[in-house]
Image (cartoon, rainbow, N blue to C red):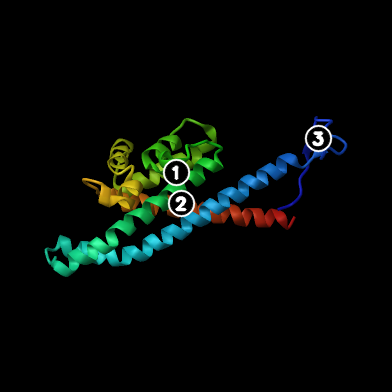
Amino acid sequence: MRAKKNECNDLQCPDNENGFCQREFEEESDKSLRTRMIATECKSFFRVFLDIEKHVLPLWEKMRDGTIDEETIEEYSLYHIPYVVNGAFAAELALKYLLENADIDYAQGNKGHDLKYLFDLLLLKKKSIQVDRDTVIALLCKDGTQNLDTLKQNIAAWHDCYNRHRYFYAQTSIGTNGVFPVFVHTVCEYVISKSKREQEKDEEQSEI
């Protein structure tokens, strides 16, 4: 990333040189590094989700056509939990990437795993998130055959699926629906693609 100096009115600033310094640029570089790391984690968990999905989809097909047997049930029980956990975490990281990129704060800890909470932050009427918000919503509605209201209802139905599936043995009931995998695919693919474009842009600027 190329060097860039910014105006600096702080006479006590150790980086002040003739009224300019690189402090703001360095802070921006830190933000860029953080968002890039989040995108990399998102890609990692999404890839595991896709690998597990290869096993899950044939099991779903057996359930739909009524050819379910004891072996299918056992296989499903082995793959379903890690499928949801990895998908939910990948989607969580995708949403956090968009929020970080737009300078929107979000809670840490358990609340930070809540997909409805993160998605609602994406809906804030802030100019910094407008393009990503509108694009992601349009893609989700198209891919999932939803409108914004039904999309929000579906997310609310499995908003805490990361925690609930991770600790499924302590739950009385757990579950997702058909919109969940669509949500994971759409938000993760969007963020991975966006991150790649941003990285390529940074690399081009560094060569200037």
Indicate the position of residue 184 as horizontal and vertical percent values. Answer: 37, 52
Indicate the position of residue 97 as horizontal and vertical percent values. Answer: 51, 46
Name the kind of residue labelled 1 in the image. Thr
SS for callout 1: helix
Mark 2 or mark 1, whichever is nearer to me: 2
Indicate the position of residue 86 as horizontal and vertical percent values. Answer: 38, 56
SS for callout 3: loop
Mark 1 or mark 3, whichever is nearer to me: 3
Viewed as shown, does residue 110 lie left or right of 74? right
Per the image, the residue denoted by label 1 is 135
Viewed as shown, does residue 76 lie left or right of 130? left
Name the kind of residue labelled 3 in the image. Cys
Mark 1 surroundings: few (<14), some (14-19) or many (≥20) residues within 10 A: few
Taking depth in this image into account, of 164 and 186 the one nearest to the observer is 164
Name the kind of residue labelled 2 in the image. Tyr
Please tell me whether residue 136 is drawn above or below residue 54 in the rendered image. Answer: above
Q: Earlier in the sequence, mark 2 or mark 3?
A: 3
Per the image, the residue denoted by label 2 is 190
How many numbered marks, from 0 up? Answer: 3
Identity of the residue drawn at 79% across and 35% down:
7
Q: In the drawing, what numbered circle is on residue 13?
A: 3
Indicate the position of residue 162 as horizontal and vertical percent values. Answer: 35, 48
Q: Earlier in the sequence, mark 1 or mark 3?
A: 3
Tag 2–tag 1 contact (CB < 8 Å) = yes
